[in-house]
Amino acid sequence: MKLLLAKVAWDHPPTIAGYRRLVIRRALWLVGLGVPFLLCLVCLFFDVLRQGALLFLMGMIGFATWVPWVTIAFIRRRRVAAILRSYPWHELPCHYPRRASGNPATIAISFCEGYSPVLRIIPFPVSLAHPENTRPELIWFAGDPRYGGVVSPVGGHYPVRVVPDKVPAEGWHGGDDVLASRVGLRRRSGKGTQT
């Protein structure tokens, strides 16, 4: 693993700016889904604009399934910040395996010879090869390879949470379990968190 910075990822100014954009993006998702739904419920409760609110609410029912995901994504942004405040960035080679659907939901990072786990981009898949990435064959990684962490295109400007897609039987050895538990990468049971 090639060490990019001797300090934590949070000390890198583009990373802080990228995290702020992540918070704003997730807050807008939450407001965009939550506020119209709450307005409809208020209108129905107080019997104001009942016909329009009922029609709008019927249209919102299709989006209601996204509200829990967006809420979880907004709450879990703190885990991204905790990882960035505790782990340094590492510049590593990677490739983007495609699924049959063409979904850019995974990234394979080569941590060392013979260990290139596939990591899922959560909670919403994004193609990291594209967001202002001048070197798609390299990725910045902060975290524990056994449990996941945060990745960004080279430069640290677009931090995204990743978790292992499948945990290999003979995987990465080493790492700091106490630190991984403290930042929320590892549960008490010893398994990695998936959000």
Image (tube, rainbow, N blue to C red):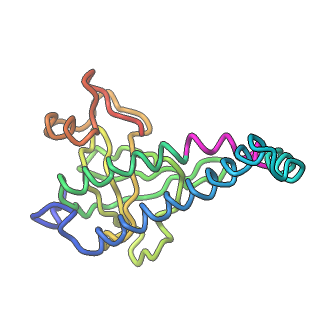
Q: Quadrant of the C terminus?
A: top left
Q: Quadrant of the N terminus?
A: bottom left
Q: Position of residue 28 (x, y in %)?
A: 54, 62
Spot occupied by residue 16 in the image (x, y as percentages of width and height)? 29, 68
Who is closer to the viewer here, 115 or 56?
56
- Left or right of 101? Residue 14 is left
Q: Position of residue 185 (x, y in %)?
A: 28, 39
Q: As rendered, which of 17 and 172 lies closer to the eye?
A: 17
Task: Identify the residue at image location x=28%, y=61%.
Answer: 92
Q: Check if residue 107 falls in the magenta segment.
A: no
Depth check, front residue: 26 or 177: 26
What segment is highlighted magenta in the picture?
59-69
Q: Is residue 114 above or below residue 126?
A: above
- Residue at image location 48% in from the left, 42% down from the top: 72
Q: Main secondary structure of the magenta part?
A: helix
Report which quarter residue 148 is drawn in.
top left
Name the outermost residue toward the right.
Answer: 51
| Residue at the extreme top of the image, as rendered | 189
